[in-house]
Amino acid sequence: MSIIRYNANDFVPTSFSALVDRFFNDSITRAGGSTFVPKTDVVETANAYEVHLALPGVNKEDFNIEVNDNYLTISGERKFQNEKKDKNYHAIETHYGSFSRSFTLPENIDASKINAKYNNGILEVTIPKDEKKVLKQTIKVS
């Protein structure tokens, strides 16, 4: 086993948001919990919203994607498989267990055309915009 140099800056969050994320992500996992929150990017294009979740090692069959009212919920499980007894893990930094993320959807989307694909450990959920529903309007003052 190699010795890893301790760096105090590795454990100091750079922002309040990072502190909150670390509290809810790391403390649950390190306390022996079996849930985690995947890292997520939300992108808006001219025609759609895209939600990208970093979920390496999850099988496509283990995802559950639901739309209920105006909420999109993505959940599933990444299973830890320790079939070989001759392995001696010194550190496990990847997340295992169940996960769930929910997102409030805007009113200008077409929920019937939402699709998802999984490629290179990234789950990409595309939520097309509905051109008929316009959220922005200009009001003239009289």
Image (tube, rainbow, N blue to C red):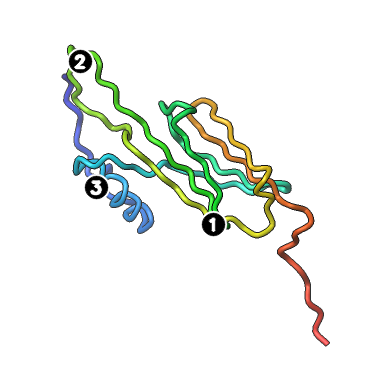
Image quadrant where one finds the N terminus: top left
Q: Position of residue 140 (x, y in %)?
A: 81, 79
Place residue 112 in its image quadrant: top right
User: Upstream in the sequence, badge 3 or badge 1?
Assistant: 3
Give the amino acid type for the residue marked by disc 3 in the picture: Ser
The residue that appears at 64% across and 45% down in the rendered structure is 127
Place residue 141 in its image quadrant: bottom right
Q: Tag on residue 104?
A: 1
**Pick the front one: 52 or 129:** 129
- Residue under pointer 2: 87
Residue 55 horizontal side relative to residue 25, left or right: right
Q: CA distance from mark 2 to mark 3?
A: 25 Å
Question: Could you tell me if the residues under marks 3 and 1 are in contact, i.e. CB atoms within 8 Å?
Answer: no
Q: Tag on residue 27?
A: 3
User: Upstream in the sequence, badge 2 or badge 1?
Assistant: 2
User: Does residue 117 lie above or below 31 as drawn?
Assistant: above
The residue that appears at 69% across and 57% down in the rendered structure is 108
Q: Position of residue 13 (x, y in %)?
A: 31, 51
